[in-house]
Image: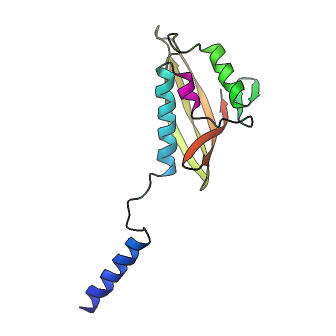
């Protein structure tokens, strides 16, 4: 009887302190979902939807090829110039070999391969490295180095 009471007390304490409640989705899964959302938005021709994954700040940094840009607006206009968006082909974007490493509870590092497939079957691919930061409940890319 004493053992049953002890077990019941332990279970009640676990519930009271949230240890027995369903776990939140892991940051790694949330970050992968963010990248999946970006790929889906891109493939739909929704550049603004794609850009929702980025920190909307002048402090966002983006490195591509041999150029560096700062700020969400600069990144958006760079993409807009190269890929006109809605009703214009942007291609199908996929990410593969994605690896996410947590740098702390509110910072992460992700890397992998991107591939862009156009309607004519031509493909471009490269590597990416992202630094992400958690803002409230949302993860956002604060630095993107894609080649």
At horizontal 61% and vertical 52% (from top left) the residue drawn is 106
Whether 1 is drawn above or below 117: the answer is: below
- Between 73 and 36, the one lying in front of the other is 73
Q: Magenta stretch: residue 27 in it? A: no
* Lateral position of residue 55 relative to residue 96, left or right: right
At horizontal 64% and vertical 37% (from top left) the residue drawn is 55
At horizontal 55% and vertical 15% (from top left) the residue drawn is 85
* Lateral position of residue 11 relative to residue 103, left or right: left
Examine the rendering and report whether any part of residue 71 can be seen.
Answer: yes
* Lateral position of residue 130 relative to residue 123, left or right: right
| Quadrant of res 52 | top right
Quarter of the image for the N terminus: give it.
bottom left
Examine the rendering and report whether any part of residue 64 can be seen.
Answer: no
x, y percent for residue 131: 65, 42
Quarter of the image for the C terminus: give it.
top right
- Between 43 and 124, the one lying in front of the other is 43
Whether 17 is drawn above or below 75: the answer is: below
Q: Please provide the residue range marked out in magenta.
A: 46-54
């Amino acid at each position: 009887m004493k053992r049953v009471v002890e077990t019941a007390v332990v279970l009640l304490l676990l519930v009271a302190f949230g240890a027995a409640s369903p776990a939140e989705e892991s940051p790694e899964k949330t970050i992968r979902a963010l990248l999946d959302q970006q790929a889906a938005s891109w493939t739909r021709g929704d550049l603004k939807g794609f850009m929702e994954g980025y920190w909307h700040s002048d402090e966002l940094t983006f490195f591509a090829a041999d150029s560096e840009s700062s700020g969400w607006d600069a990144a958006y206009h760079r993409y807009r110039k190269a890929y006109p968006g809605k009703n214009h082909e942007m291609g199908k974007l996929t990410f593969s070999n994605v690896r996410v490493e947590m740098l702390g509870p509110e910072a992460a590092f992700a890397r992998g391969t991107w591939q862009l497939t156009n309607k004519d079957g031509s493909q471009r691919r490269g590597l990416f490295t992202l630094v992400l930061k958690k803002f409230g409940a949302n993860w956002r890319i604060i630095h993107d180095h894609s080649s």
